[in-house]
Image (cartoon, rainbow, N blue to C red):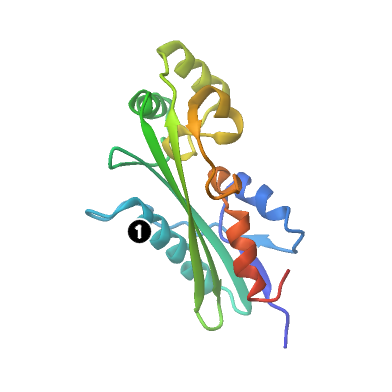
Amino acid sequence: MKKKKIILGSSSKFRKKLFSTLNLDFTCISPDINESQHNNEKPEDMAIRLAIEKAKKICLLESNSLVVSSDACASCDGRILGKPLTKDIAIEYLEYISSKTIIFHTSICVMDSDTMKYNIDIAKYTIKIKKLNTEDINNYVDTHKPYYSSAAFRYEVAKDFLIKEFNDKEDDISGLIGLPLKKLTNILKNYNVL
């Protein structure tokens, strides 16, 4: 049987860096899908749907491949906070989450392009945010430019600044950075690639 190509369906440098720790030969393809929220869609459902849609789009273009895709969705008080993309929206998000609890859902999907069958899982993180003042928010945004991170939250550079309380029930911080490696490893074992 011909060995399957492994494709990471992402343009995220954070996901690429995390995935490279698995020591697998892989290529990256950006799925470029519409990531808008559907009406009344829950954050967890949105993260799962988008990971499947990303994998499916690449699987339709690539044969003999295992496609790995992921999506992170942050919510606070029921409001989904996506990637801010601009400085103004990043500041607005950080002002909004100040002193509140934010929940991150990071999905992971592995799809076989020949059968279109997939395995999916999701990591969930609940984090209490510190009270943030305007000066600190502006400094954080100017320094770290978190425009492509859900809710303008970049764990790896802001954990001390943002987090008041966090119990990592997943026992795997990688999902907060963008790719839940523990769950991914468990899925990949089914495909005999590790």
**In which image quadrant can residue 41 be found?**
bottom left
Q: Residue at x 61, y 50 (%)?
A: 15
- Percent from the top left, x then y, of residue 60? 50, 75
Q: Secondary structure at mark 1?
A: helix
- Percent from the top left, x then y, of residue 177? 57, 43
Q: Is residue 120 visible?
A: yes
Q: Is residue 60 visible?
A: no
- Is 188 located above or below residue 133 in the figure? below
Left or right of 117? Residue 191 is: right
Q: Residue at x 66, y 71 (%)?
A: 189
**Residue under numbered circle 1:** 45
Q: Nearer the viewer, residue 112 or 64?
A: 112
- Percent from the top left, x then y, of residue 19? 67, 55
Q: Residue at x 54, y 43 (%)?
A: 168
Name the residue type under label 1.
Answer: Asp
The residue most toward the bottom is 1
Q: Number of labelled discs? A: 1
**In which image quadrant can residue 49 be found?**
bottom left
Q: Quadrant of the N terminus?
A: bottom right
Q: Quadrant of the C terminus?
A: bottom right
- Percent from the top left, x then y, of residue 88? 38, 24
- Is 76 located above or below residue 186 in the figure? above
- Is 137 located above or below residue 79 in the figure? above
The residue most toward the left is 39
The residue most toward the top is 135
Question: Mark 1, residues whose alpha carbon is within 10 Å: few (<14), some, or many (≥20)?
Answer: some
Q: Residue at x 47, y 68 (%)?
A: 57
